Amino acid sequence: MAAIKNNDELQDILSDILVNLKLKFIQPVLNENSRLLALMEDIKIQDQAGIEELKERVDQLEKKVEEIPLLVLSAIRDAINQASGEV
């Protein structure tokens, strides 16, 4: 009977040790991991929004670059028309 009581006490002590280890060491790490994961998700969402905005700006820039030759030709045509009208 004494052996069973000692075994139960030892089991209780080991259980208390494991519970406290979890509370003091493992749970804080898990909590920090959860916090970091949430932070990384927020950063990912912000990055995706920034990339989308950057893509839109690049598209607008490409359109403007495509318009430049037409603007130059139009300016040359206008200059020729003005010069021929002044002569």
Image (cartoon, helix red, strand yellow):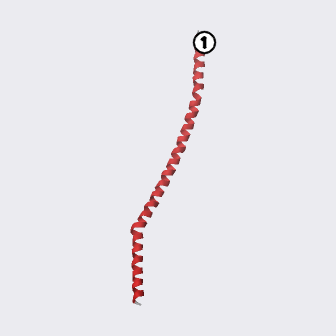
What's under tag 1, amino acid-wise? Ser
Q: In screen coordinates, is 30 left or right of 59? A: left
Q: Which residue is mark 1?
A: 84
Q: Quadrant of the C terminus?
A: top right
Q: Position of residue 17 (x, y in %)?
A: 39, 74
Q: Nearer the viewer, residue 5 or 68?
A: 5
Q: Nearer the viewer, residue 57 or 5?
A: 5
Q: Residue at x 53, y 43 (%)?
A: 53
Q: Quadrant of the N terminus?
A: bottom left
Q: Dot 1 lies on which element?
A: helix
Q: Is residue 23 above or below residue 10?
A: above
Q: Residue furthest top?
A: 87
Q: In screen coordinates, is 32 left or right of 87? A: left
Q: Residue furthest front?
A: 3
Q: Residue at x 57, y 23 (%)?
A: 72
Q: Is residue 10 above or below residue 82?
A: below
Q: Is residue 60 above or below residue 16?
A: above
Q: Is residue 64 above or below residue 33?
A: above
Q: Quadrant of residue 27?
A: bottom left
Q: Position of residue 46 (x, y in %)?
A: 50, 49
Q: Position of residue 26 (x, y in %)?
A: 42, 66
Q: Residue furthest bottom?
A: 1
Q: Residue at x 57, y 34 (%)?
A: 62
Q: Residues within 10 Å of mark 1 (few under 14, many from 20)?
A: few
Q: Position of residue 10 (x, y in %)?
A: 39, 81
Q: Residue at x 58, y 33 (%)?
A: 63
